[in-house]
Image: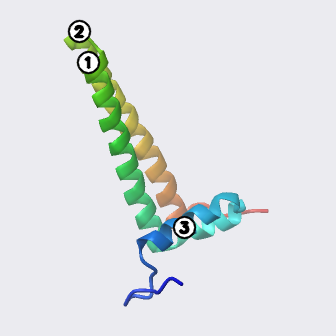
Amino acid sequence: MCRAGPTGVPPHPARAVTAASKAGASHAEAVAWIGRPLNAVLLLAFLAAAFHHTAAGVQVIVEDYANAEWVKMASILAVKAVCVLLWLASSVAVLRIAVGGVRYVG
């Protein structure tokens, strides 16, 4: 059994299990889950960490396997730019849902 902390919010592992259990949820359920403030904040933090981790991992691969210095630099800049753009797009989507800009009609 998972016990809630002093704020009434389950600890982090329980939140991860909650998020994973929503994999088969309907659109309305997913929007409602993301619309909760704590879930939205944690999702934004997860997105930032995930895209940072992706960029760092691909940078290591590029540094190991690219030979020319200009190829390394161009590839690293491209990867970081793509990760920032994807993070920005996904964060805007979460924020739109969290502040009520997306409504379920159906």
Tag 2–tag 1 contact (CB < 8 Å): yes
Q: Earlier in the sequence, mark 1 or mark 3?
A: 3
* Residue at 39% across, 86% down: 5
Where is residue 65? Give x, y as percent. Answer: 31, 17
Would residue 34 be visible to someone looking at this image? no
Q: CA distance from mark 3 to mark 2?
A: 44 Å
Secondary structure state at the residue bearing disc 3 = helix
How crowded is the residue under tag 3: few (<14 C-alpha within 10 Å), some, or many (20+)?
few
Q: Residue at x 35, y 51 (%)?
A: 49
Find out whether the residues at labels 3 and 2 contact each other: C-beta distance under 8 Å.
Answer: no
Residue beneath disc 1 = 72
Q: Secondary structure at mark 1?
A: helix
> Relative to residue 34, is residue 89 depicted above or below?
above
Say left or right for 31 vs 4: right
* Mark 2 neighbour class, 10 Å CA radius: few under 14, some 14 to 19, many 20 or more: few
State the residue in front, 80 or 88. 80
| Residue highlighted by disc 3 | 17
In the rendered image, residue 13, in percent from the top left (x then y), is placed at 45, 70
Determine whether label 1 and label 3 are within 8 Å by CB.
Answer: no
* Residue closest to the eye, 90 or 11: 11
Q: Is residue 7 left or right of residue 30?
A: left
Locate residue 70: give its quadrant.
Answer: top left
- The amino acid marked with disc number 3 is Val
Q: CA distance from mark 1 to mark 3?
A: 38 Å
Check disc 1 and give the amino acid type: Lys
Give the quarter of the image for residue 78: top left
Instruction: Look at the image and tell me in which quarter the C terminus lies.
Output: bottom right
Indicate which disc residue 68 carries: 2
In the displayed structure, would residue 59 be above or below residue 36?
Answer: above
Looking at the rendered image, the quarter that the N terminus falls into is bottom right
Q: Residue at x 42, y 52 (%)?
A: 47
